[in-house]
Every structure is written in structure tokens, then in C-alpha cells.
Image (cartoon, rainbow, N blue to C red):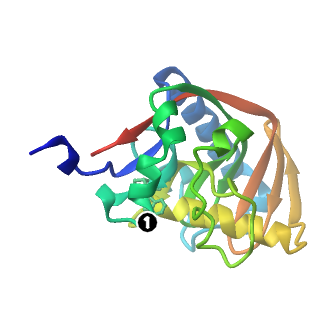
């Protein structure tokens, strides 16, 4: 087939270098392990059954931060995004992502990514539109670290937007614990957010995934 007919990727995004993937996975495991031992957490369990959090969340493949989900060209705005000259010029470039928080819900565990102005140039305008709140561009940026049985990774961004919408709505959450990694807040309905004391710098390559 001529080159023009080749499908667009499943998604574009930043892919963490393998050395830092290991580090992020370890930090996330530590977080889940510690969370599991906290009294505050035991009293507000995310599932009716006693579950070991590390078993409850299944890993979801190579760690990445999705910019545009294209679904091989079927997603709205996919072609426009793929043809954007800025996207084109930055394809294959190295970036440093800043992971500023970890969060857990009954469905997903993820890391919040705080994008720089340069990184925001790669951010699609419609990424936050699934949220009823009007959150600034880049709010959805995250790395999925694990999903509960039967939950799709797309849920992680939805869960993050939900917590940020609560914050924007003035809901401070319930301060739950000062952990070594940072301060933990409870937002109800099994939603926990840990603001990292020290953001994790994660080198990543802007590229695409075909699957
Ligand atoms: O964890 P994620 O960001 O959530 O990475 C995966 C990736 O694309 C491949 O499935 C994300 N994803 C899936 N569907 C959507 C969607 N409708 N909108 C935004 N991101 C999506 C998923």
C-alpha cells in the first residue's frame, strides 16, 4: 500500500526510558505497600474484600504518558494531531517528565504528570473535554501504573480528572497521613492522592505506539 494509506498509530505519547520505568514501578509498589498498612486506609478500603493492593492492580505494559489517542485514525481529531507540524518536528525527541503525584482509586493507580510549556505544545486541545469541570490543558496528563481486573487503562485519566475536579470545586479532601514520599489526602469513594515531596524526573521519548 502507498505510504499515505498506512494507518495512524493507536496513540502518541511520551515513553519512559526503561531505567526510569523500573524506578517508577518500585516507587509505586512502595506506595501501595505503605498504603495497605495505614489505619486510615484500612478504615476506607477500596474494595469490600480484603485485598492485597499489589495483587489487586494488574500492570498495563510499558509506562507512558498518552498525548493523543488516535485509535488508528478513527478517534476524533487524530488526523489533525498527526499532521501538526509541531508534533512532527518533536517526534522522536527526548523530554523530561515531572511526576508530581500518585493516586489510587478502586479502578486504577497512576502518576500525575505536570507538563512544561514546551510539553503542552504536544497536548491536544480536547484531552480534558470528558470532564464536566473546566480544567486547564494538561490536567489529564498521567502515567497508568495499574488497573483493577476488567478495567481499561483509559479509566486512569478519567479518575485523575475526577479528583482534580473535586479540588477545583474547593473540596480540600481529608488529610490522611504524612508519608515519607509526601502527603496523602482522601477524596472519598476510595480515591486517594499522594502529593510527592520530591517530584520524580522521568526521561521519556515522544513517539507513538501501533500495537
Ligand atoms: O493509560 P493510558 O493513557 O490510557 O494509555 C492507554 C492508551 O491510550 C492505549 O490504550 C489511552 N486511551 C485509550 N482510550 C482513550 C481515549 N478514548 N482517550 C484518551 N486516552 C485513551 C489508554
Tell me the quadrant of the picture where the N terminus can be found.
Answer: top left
Which residue, as the protein is rendered here, is positioned at the far left? 1
Q: Is residue 200 shown to the viewer in this render?
A: yes
In this rendered view, identify the residue nearer to me: 70 or 32.
70
Quadrant of picture, ligand 1 = bottom left
Q: Nearer the viewer, residue 16 or 73?
A: 73
- Looking at the image, residue 163 sits to the left or right of residue 147; the answer is right
At 18% across and 41% down in the image, what residue appears? 3
Q: Residue at x 41, y 58 (%)?
A: 78
> Residue 187's x, y, as percent?
78, 68
Above or below, comparing residue 147 to residue 54 in the picture: below
Q: Which residue is mark 1?
A: 151
Q: x and y percent of residue 181 in the render?
A: 78, 37
Hey, which residue is sitting farthest top in the picture?
19
Task: Mark yes or no: residue 58 visible.
Answer: no
* Number of disc labels: 1
Q: Position of residue 117 (x, y in %)?
A: 73, 40
> Looking at the picture, does residue 186 appear above or below residue 177?
below
Circle 1 Cα neighbour tier, 10 Å, few/some/many (<14 / 14–19 / ≥20): some
Between 46 and 146, the one nearer to me in the picture:
146
**Residue ID at (52%, 32%):** 90
In the displayed orientation, state which residue is furthest to the bottom: 132
Q: Is residue 185 left or right of residue 19?
A: right
Q: Position of residue 52 (x, y in %)?
A: 54, 54
Mark 1 lies on a secondary structure that is: loop
From this view, report whether residue 180 is shown above or below residue 131: above
Residue 150 occupies quadrant: bottom left
Against 108, residue 177 (above or below) is above
In the foreground, 121 or 65:
121
Q: Is mark 1 within 8 Å of ligand 1?
A: no
Residue drawn at x 46%, y 37% is 88
The quadrant where residue 170 appears: bottom right
Amino acid at each position: 500500500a502507498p505510504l499515505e494509506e498506512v494507518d495512524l498509530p493507536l496513540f502518541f505519547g511520551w515513553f519512559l526510558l526503561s531505567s526510569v520505568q523500573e524506578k517508577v514501578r518500585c516507587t509505586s509498589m512502595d506506595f501501595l505497600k505503605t498504603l495497605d498498612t495505614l489505619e486510615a486506609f484500612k478504615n476506607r478500603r477500596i474494595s469490600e474484600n480484603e485485598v492485597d493492593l499489589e495483587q489487586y492492580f494488574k500492570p498495563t505494559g510499558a509506562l507512558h504518558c498518552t498525548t493523543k489517542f488516535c485509535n488508528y485514525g478513527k478517534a476524533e481529531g487524530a488526523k489533525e494531531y498527526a499532521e501538526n507540524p509541531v508534533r512532527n518536528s518533536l517526534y522522536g525527541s527526548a523530554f523530561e517528565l515531572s511526576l508530581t503525584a500518585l493516586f489510587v482509586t478502586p479502578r486504577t493507580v497512576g502518576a500525575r504528570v505536570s507538563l512544561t510549556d514546551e510539553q503542552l505544545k504536544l497536548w491536544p486541545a480536547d484531552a480534558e473535554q470528558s470532564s464536566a469541570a473546566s480544567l486547564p490543558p494538561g490536567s489529564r496528563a498521567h502515567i497508568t501504573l495499574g488497573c483493577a481486573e476488567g478495567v481499561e487503562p483509559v479509566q486512569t485519566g478519567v479518575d485523575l480528572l475526577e479528583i482534580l475536579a473535586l479540588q477545583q470545586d474547593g473540596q480540600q479532601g481529608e488529610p490522611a497521613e504524612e508519608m515519607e514520599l509526601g502527603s496523602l489526602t482522601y477524596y472519598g469513594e476510595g480515591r486517594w492522592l499522594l502529593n510527592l515531596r520530591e517530584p520524580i524526573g522521568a526521561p521519556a521519548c515522544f513517539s507513538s505506539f501501533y500495537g
